[in-house]
Image (tube, rainbow, N blue to C red):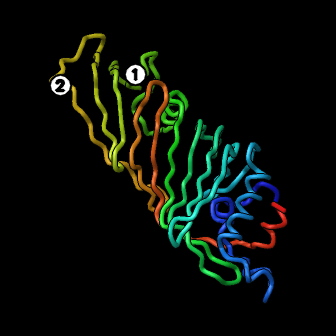
Amino acid sequence: MGTGWSLSSITTSWVDPVATLGAGTMTALVPDSVMTALSLGIARRYVGREVTVTLQGVPVTARLGSFRVRRQGAHFESRARLTGIDWGGHALEEVTAVANGVRLVPGAPTRVRTAQIDLEGRVALSALLAQVNLQSNLDWILFAEESGLIRAEHRHRRLTALVDASIADDVLRIEVIRARWRGVPVPGRYLPAPVIPLPPLPNDARNVRATRDGHVVRFTLEIPMLSSSFDLTQLLRLIG
């Protein structure tokens, strides 16, 4: 399986209570002990290395910067920091993934359930705009200005605009700072401030926020409850 195991294995493997090892073997280990052993094994083997995982059928390659786990009451929390991410051709500078409310459902295989996964990261504005410009149904071509603002040029009309944008709760808000039509300034009273609901994300994920910080866009996503299972024996062999 190499490093190409599923993302759910990386984010939840440390909480399996070793039920898949066979009747009577290692069943005396408490979940905290298993969690510690697996999290240390994953960190020792993969931190500082490039890994490839699969997320919703899309290959994701990144360098694992850190990985840690802690108990929160009756549940667990895992935190992983990834850098230099290539998500199916989309370049991200850094992402921190936090799996909250992780709990165990013993069995063969053991199921791991998370209450929510929070993703916080940053992406270069120029890289993001390059991806947006690939959309064939977009009437505008977007460029990153030296100021960090966005210059929009209409594909068919002699209309240009300088804009900024942000996302909050799955809604895109565009601020038109100034615009020109055929080189003539457009009066401010004719400049709309579009508010555009975004299409749903896979797995009921939510765009919590995205804001521009200079030439970088910082974003936060929330992924609701997920459930997965895996072969603990194979995982232990990988990190042993």
Element class at badge 1: strand
Q: Quadrant for residue 175, please give it.
A: top left
Position of 83 with respect to 150 (left or right) is: right
Residue highlighted by disc 2: 190
In the picture, the disc for residue 81 is none
Residue at 49 percent across and 54 percent down: it is 118
Residue highlighted by disc 1: 151
Closer to the camera, 33 or 235? 33
Q: Position of residue 143 (x, y in %)?
A: 46, 23
Position of 155 with respect to 159 (left or right) is: right
Quadrant of the rendering where the N terminus is positioned = bottom right
Closer to the camera, 30 or 182? 30
The amino acid at mark 1 is Arg
Question: Alpha-carbon distance for marks 1 and 2?
Answer: 18 Å
Residue at 51 percent across and 50 percent down: it is 119
Closer to the camera, 149 or 153? 149
Near mark 2 (Cα within 10 A), the count class, few <14, some 14-19 or many ≥20, is: few
Closer to the camera, 6 or 213? 213
The amino acid at mark 2 is Tyr
Which numbered disc, 1 or 2, marks the residue that appears first in the sequence?
Answer: 1
Residue at 44 percent across and 24 percent down: it is 214
Judge whether 184 appears above or below 82 on screen: above
